[in-house]
Image (cartoon, rainbow, N blue to C red):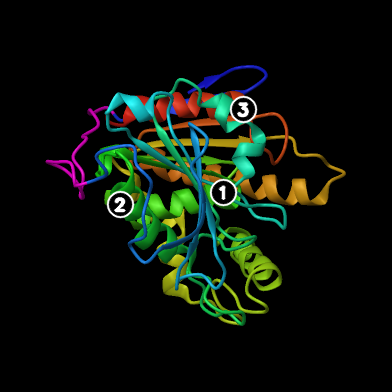
């Protein structure tokens, strides 16, 4: 582990080589779209709005039984996609929580510039203002099954409509804040789907400090997404569901994956939201890293000054690492 100023970072590698064998997709490429053509309905998704006029950024909005409103998705294509004839790896990139958080979040930050010239497809879906990348225990406002939408519907829809590698070594998942938690959760829970996982200021522990992050997930989902329903249940948690979603309880599920984490070390002391969020992020990621280290599971981590926000330089570093880990276009 190295210490640098002004950032603190480390890359932990296992003594043995990392196997690229996967539980899903090892041994071949599944069927996927063969040409640059307009996408169609399928996998439980019906397109109700679309814009494919931009060479790189294609936009869709779907009707789906998994969600009680029509969620949107941005699909950012690599330069030359329409003429290259090549297949590409895919990064699923998840936004954080809040009333202003949606599938356009990373486009507002500059994802087109960050990814220019990079041979990868980037899929950025809606995840709700506080959906927590989960199928909730209860909802008083219709279906909000984000886990079903992302994993059972959107992922196979992308493989069916774009030239992808529909296999373990063809996919990565990453996110910021709540989306970082979602990335860690999906990578473990659906082990064979993603070969790389990244959490940019994403919490990694639901139960620490009296279950503060789990309670926060319940509180925010009740207020912003579920009209009083909750992700994990109130007053009693659905303990099996929490354990299944909790990264620190799924350590072995990160073996043979690239793992990348970022946390801030100095949140704004005047901003309670920034302080509360990044303090828990940092503590939870340290707990998670410690468990990965004990299990000899490789991981790269960065502790850097500042609070709860996306750091473009580390996102670019992460993107290069993702491309290095996945199958080449």
- In the image, residue 240 above or below residue 72: below
Question: Helix, strand, or loop for circle 3?
Answer: helix
Within 10 Å of disc 2 (Cα), the crowding (few <14, some 14-19, many 20+) is: many
User: In which image quadrant can residue 200 be found?
Assistant: top right
Between residue 162 and residue 322, name the one nearer to us.
162
**Image point (67%, 19%), residue name:** 6
**Comparing marks 1 and 3, which lies closer to the viewer?**
3
Residue 13 visible at all: no
**Image point (41%, 65%), residue name:** 148
Which numbered marker is on residue 312? 3
- In the image, residue 2 above or below residue 234: above
Image: magenta residue range: 15-31
Q: Is residue 319 left or right of residue 191?
A: right
- Tell me residue 67's x, y (percent): 51, 70
The residue pinned by badge 2 equals 191
Within 10 Å of disc 3 (Cα), the crowding (few <14, some 14-19, many 20+) is: few
The residue pinned by badge 1 equals 284
Between residue 287 and residue 305, name the one nearer to us.
305
Between residue 62 and residue 28, name the one nearer to us.
62
- Tell me residue 145's x, y (percent): 48, 69
- Tell me residue 10's x, y (percent): 49, 26
Question: Helix, strand, or loop for circle 2?
Answer: helix
Q: Mark 3 or mark 1, which is nearer the start of the sequence?
A: 1
Q: Is residue 244 left or right of residue 263?
A: left
């Amino acid at each position: 582990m190295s210490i640098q100023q002004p950032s603190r970072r480390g890359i932990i590698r296992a003594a043995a080589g990392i196997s690229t064998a996967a539980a899903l997709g090892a041994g071949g490429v599944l069927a996927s779209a063969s040409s640059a053509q307009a996408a169609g309905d399928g996998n439980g998704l019906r397109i109700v709005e679309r814009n494919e006029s931009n060479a790189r950024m294609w936009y869709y909005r779907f009707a789906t039984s998994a969600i009680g409103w029509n969620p949107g998705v941005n699909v950012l294509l690599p330069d030359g996609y329409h003429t290259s004839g090549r297949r590409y790896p895919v990064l699923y990139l998840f936004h954080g929580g809040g009333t202003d958080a949606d599938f356009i979040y990373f486009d507002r930050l500059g994802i087109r510039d960050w990814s220019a010239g990079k041979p990868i497809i980037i899929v950025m879906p809606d995840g709700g203002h506080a959906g927590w990348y989960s199928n909730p225990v209860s909802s008083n406002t219709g279906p909000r099954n984000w886990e079903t939408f992302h994993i059972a519907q959107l992922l196979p829809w992308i493989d069916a409509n774009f030239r992808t590698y529909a296999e373990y070594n063809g996919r990565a998942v990453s996110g910021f804040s709540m989306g970082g938690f979602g990335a860690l959760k999906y990578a473990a829970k659906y082990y064979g789907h993603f070969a790389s996982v990244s959490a940019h200021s994403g919490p990694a522990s639901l139960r620490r400090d009296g279950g503060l992050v789990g309670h926060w997930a319940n509180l925010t989902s009740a207020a912003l997404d579920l009209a009083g329903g909750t992700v994990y249940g109130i007053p009693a948690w659905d303990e099996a569901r929490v354990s299944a979603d909790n990264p620190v309880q799924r350590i072995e599920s990160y073996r043979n994956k690239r793992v990348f984490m970022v946390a801030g070390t100095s949140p704004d002391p005047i901003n309670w939201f920034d302080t509360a969020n990044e303090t828990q992020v940092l503590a939870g990621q340290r707990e998670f890293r410690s468990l990965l280290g004990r299990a000899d599971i490789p991981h790269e981590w960065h502790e850097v000054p500042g609070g709860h926000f996306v750091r473009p330089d580390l996102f670019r570093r992460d993107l290069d690492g993702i491309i290095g880990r996945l199958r080449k276009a």
